[in-house]
Each structure stands twice: as C-alpha cells, then as structure tokens.
Image (cartoon, rainbow, N blue to C red):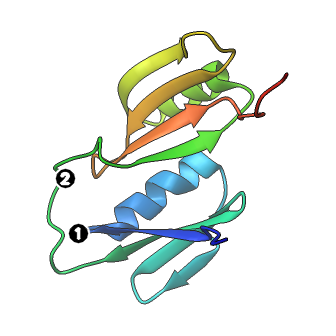
Amino acid sequence: MLSLNSLMIFSEDPKKLNEFYKKVFQKENDMEDGGYYGFVAGNTFLGFGPHNKVKGMSKNPERMMLNFDTKDVKGEFVRIKKLGAKVIAEPYQMLGSDMWIATFADPDGNYFQLTTPWEGDKK
C-alpha cells in the first residue's frame, strides 16, 4: 500500500504562506531552501514553493482541502481567526457524528479545515 508522506503547494509568494503557517502551527518551519519552505505536520511534510505557472489566488479552493486534526476545534478556530485567516465556515458538527469541522482560507485562498480527530468506528 502507498503512504502519503508529503504535500507541496505552489504559490506566487511561498514566503507569505510560510509566514502564515508558522503562526497556524505555532512553530518555525522545519525546512527552508532556495525559496522553498516546509513543515512537519503530524506524519506529513507540508511544503510551499514557487512555480512559474502559479499566479494569484487559488481559482478552485474547494478542489482540495488540508485537514488539521485538533481535539479543540472551537478554541483553535478562535485563535486562527485572530491571525487574519478568512473564515469559510464557522465550527459545525457533521450530521450524525461527534466530529467538529471549521474551514478557513489561507493568504493564497487555499482552503484548510480544523477537524476533530477521526477515531474510526466506535462499534
């Protein structure tokens, strides 16, 4: 089976994304090299870099969402909102579950969510 170990997001201004996600993750980036930046986030490496074909804001931010697990979706929502992240959806509960979700947009317009950690079937 394949295992997803990293995700690269290209940007016209990866340094701006790096500065934003430093505040979201509350830590310094784990990698910086030649205009590329990256963070170890759980079991995944999240990178940002330049690309000559990427300009401006994300045109389809709904296409892909980063999900960051936290047991305190509501508390983290308040903290990240104060960072200036654009709120897409205030915290809400998924129908028929104990899972909470909140959605933001980063400075490039990419969507990311705060989610209650998924614990599988509790049966």
Is 30 situated above or below 99?
A: below
Q: Secondary structure at mark 1?
A: loop
Which numbered disc flags the more N-terminal residue, 2 or 1?
1
Report x, y in % for residue 15: 38, 68
Mark 2 burial class by Cα count in 10 Å: few <14, some 14-19, many 20+: some
| Residue drawn at the location 53% of the way across and 81% of the way down | 32
Q: Secondary structure at mark 2?
A: loop
Q: Quadrant of the N terminus?
A: bottom right
- Residue 31 quadrant: bottom right
- Residue 4 quadrant: bottom right
| Residue drawn at the location 16% of the way across and 50% of the way down | 59
| Residue drawn at the location 41% of the way across and 34% of the way down | 104
Viewer-nearest residue: 77 or 102? 102
Report x, y in % for residue 108: 28, 52
35 left or right of 114 in image:
left
**Residue 12, numbered circle:** 1
Between the residue at mark 2 and the residue at mark 1, the CA separation in whole angstroms equals 9 Å
**Which residue lies under the disc numbered 2?**
57
Report x, y in % for residue 103: 44, 30
Is 60 situated above or below 100?
A: below
| Residue drawn at the location 23% of the way across and 69% of the way down | 12
92 left or right of 120 in image:
left
Viewer-nearest residue: 66 or 78? 66
Residue type of the residue flagged with mark 1 = Glu
Residue type of the residue flagged with mark 2 = Met
Mark 1 burial class by Cα count in 10 Å: few <14, some 14-19, many 20+: some
70 left or right of 94 in image:
right
Q: Is residue 60 in sight in this rendering?
A: yes
